[in-house]
Image: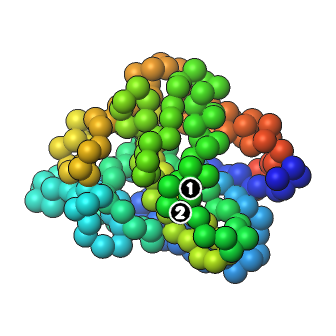
Amino acid sequence: MTGREILVFTDSSRDPERNLRRESELFELFDAGGTADFLRFWVNSPCLVRGKARNHRYGWYDERLAAELRIPVVERSSGGGVVYHDEGNLNWSFFLKTDGTFLSPTRAFQRGSEHIIAALGSLGVGAVFSPPNRIDVRGRKVSGMAARSTARSLLVHGTLLLNADLGRLNQLCTPPPGSPPVSNLTEWSQHINADAVAEAVIEDLTAAGYRVTISDPAR
């Protein structure tokens, strides 16, 4: 992959509906072939984000409590269960071109998370990929992932719990069977934050041979 270009940008919006709509629009733009690979970082105000179908296998949520607390529920274009977002949760999205070769779900999630995991390692946090779609630290979940793909394109996006409201998360979300407890990354590194993670990811991409450009692909 030496010399392959990747665009990296941080979206400033905190609007969940706008951010999820833009995620879908960016994938359609990307799949049409108009851009290089890119990585988007983004943060939502408090909300629940669900896959395209009710899915107890991957986790659901307490619908009554969400309505009572007036927590908005927005839908993403990928599958999977329900996740909680707030300002302590950094979202990341890798948009990657493929050569048409089929990738198993496990391999797709490994590919989409490898630079996140490496970046966390450089920040002193020993994160590992846990099939089918998690990043764990010492037996605790710090990131969940979902994916969308075509013959030409792969989107892998995930959460990264930095300093999220875990009490609210655990109140609202029903975890999938076998999922470990969740933890914030600040439990292992008090100085970790969104800027530090983004910088570490860019450094790892550069070390891996990417030509990194800071640019929004839709502008």
Secondary element at image label 1: helix
The correct choice, above or below, for 24 with respect to 130 in the image is below
Is residue 26 in view? no
Tag 1 residue: 107
Q: Residue furthest bottom?
A: 32
* Residue at position x 72%, y 37% in the image: 204
Marks 1 and 2: CB-CB under 8 Å?
yes
Whether residue 154 can be seen here: yes
> Can you give x and y, in whole percent of width and height, for residue 167 in the image?
23, 36
Q: Secondary structure at mark 2?
A: loop
The residue to which callout 2 is attached is 104
Question: Which disc, if any, is residue 77?
Answer: none
Q: Residue furthest right?
A: 3
Q: CA distance from mark 1 to mark 2?
A: 5 Å
The residue under label 2 is which amino acid type?
A: Ser
The residue lying at 67 percent from left, 39 percent from top is: 201
Q: Residue at x 36, y 67 (%)?
A: 51
